[in-house]
Image (cartoon, rainbow, N blue to C red):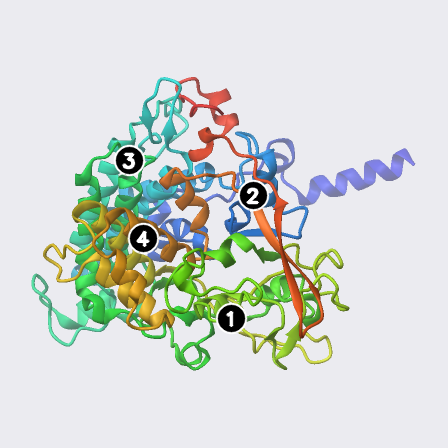
Amino acid sequence: MKKTFLILLSVIFTFVSCDDLIEPAIENNRGIDDMYAEAEFAQGILLNAYTRLPGNGWSFSDVATDDAVSNDVANNYRKIATGQWAANFNPLDQWTNSKAAIQYINIFLAEADKVTWAKDENVSKLFAQRLKGEAYGLRALYMYYLLQAHAGITEGNELLGVPILLEPETSASNFNIPRNTFQQCMDQIYSDVTKARELLPLDFELATSLPPGYDNLNDYNRVFGDLARQRMSGRIVMFVKAQAALLAASPAFNSGNSANWAAAANSAGELLVLNGGIAGIDPTGLTWYKNTAEIAALGTGVNSKEVVWRTDIANSNNLEADNFPPTLYGRGRVNPTQNLVDAFPAVNGYPITNALSNYNSANPYANRDPRLKHFILVNQDVAGVSSTVITTASNGTTNDALNKVETSTRTGYYMKKLLRQDVNLNPNSTTSQRHYRPRMRYTELYLIYAEAANEAWGPLATASYGFSAYDVIKAIRKRAGITQPDNYLESIKSDKDAMRELIRNERRLELCFEGYRFWDLRRWKLNLNESAQGMDIQGTTASPTYTKIPSVENRVFTNDMFYGPIPYSETLKFNALIQNKGW
């Protein structure tokens, strides 16, 4: 046996060098120097930042708000809503992801001018310009994500952001650095936005004439043409600035400084003017996710009128499999709450709590804002390829009924928004359809402007843009199908406080299930602990009775949770990092 082993060992030594066997072989890791002569490798450094964009998939953080619950006991947003959110359990964490993206961006910016991007020297310079512009824009965006998730008030009542990193970190770097102030972080965002705007075109499209400052149309189109669609553009950068400015102006981060609101309104207004103002609102933008002909016609990198930036388009049925009701072979995961249903006004525009709405609690889904049935599947509504009637009543006989099985609704409602009703999940005839996720929609931008303009100048002031907060809300509600004239809107159009409430509600409705409500409640410093409510429907189809369920699920948040935590592991490693209050 020993002899056989020795023979085998000698064979191994014959075919493997002593160096490789006795000492670790040199790893095949590529270094920074490899960037300079290999443009694709260099661009891959920047693409590492793109792949980390959190908007690449749906999060449904609405489950942690008063808008939705989940029937999935393992859902992380359900866990944090019910008391498990902690500095060492944070599904909303952006620290690791965004800092990694910024590290790649900083490496890229430090080395980009050394790279041979093309054999032609002029084209090479243009590529360096564009790609650095993208990098600055992405760095601004990731700083916004970091502030949204981790900025906050400390025990010393300081409003802090995150450490600002503008150079690549190495093994010799000092990692134990303090957080910068929130304002310093905002200033850095604005600085990166300015640099990006100087380097990028508004959009990546083929030019028919040479823009000022360039001397070769073919070279310009090679670099800045339509092949770069869906990369960080000047238009997207302007949108990032508006999002960040709105965050900075909001009550959680602003002590009543109207100049911050004006900055947010101006940031949004500048881009909305380029979109044609009020006339630029997409008449079909409300149902962007199910405009089947429009989606089918979208070519490579092309956006609909509603969308500024989006993910790739692909055939799938994952959303439907997760959220269709059980009789349509779905798992019914996201359940809209009665709270959200009640937020939809009557079709005449009045809140259902107002007597002029003519709301009938015995027939609660009749004569309501049309958006209700676009976005939420209510009892006896139809869904799926065969327009199947869905019965959510608790005495229903199918698994769609309230709390019937583990995949049934917990609230009496199923989510309808985002879903393609032409998807078939029947195992015998399964089909998929084209889907994409907008990272930025114009409706969000119009609502940013309305909110900020109302706070800065009042409901009716148009500043230099030619349209007011009132004008935006009027157009959005008209598109939604609110009866015209919109008498409720007219009755409050001079009341800044009432307009604020309406704008916030319009944002709640228009952007529901798209991942905004969680952040909005916190930046507005509103009640985080409103219990998720449902509807228990019983009786016959012809004569149902409706009983509100006051608490499907309680929310367990403290006021410190207006701000998210710095990761616990980071505060253990680095004593210079001050944690936010309460964490």
Residue identified by numbered label 2: 531
Labelled pair 2, 3 in contact (Cβ < 8 Å): no
Identify the disc placed on residue 166: 3
Residue 99, image quadrant: top left
Looking at the image, residue 421 sits to the left or right of residue 495; the answer is: right
Label 4 crowd bin: few (<14), some (14–19), many (20+), radius 10 Å: some
Q: Nearer the viewer, residue 580 or 542?
A: 542
Spot occupied by residue 317 in the image (x, y as percentages of width and height): 59, 69
- Amino acid marked by disc 3: Leu
Please indicate, yes or no, whether residue 196 appears anywhere in the rendered image.
no
Spot occupied by residue 244 in the image (x, y as percentages of width and height): 29, 45
Looking at the image, residue 25 sits to the left or right of residue 327; the answer is: left
Residue ID at (36%, 41%): 524
Residue identified by numbered label 1: 366
Looking at the image, residue 435 sits to the left or right of residue 252; the answer is: right
Label 2 crowd bin: few (<14), some (14–19), many (20+), radius 10 Å: some
Mark 2 and mark 3: span between their CA atoms? 43 Å
> Please, what secondary structure does the residue beneath circle 3 have?
loop
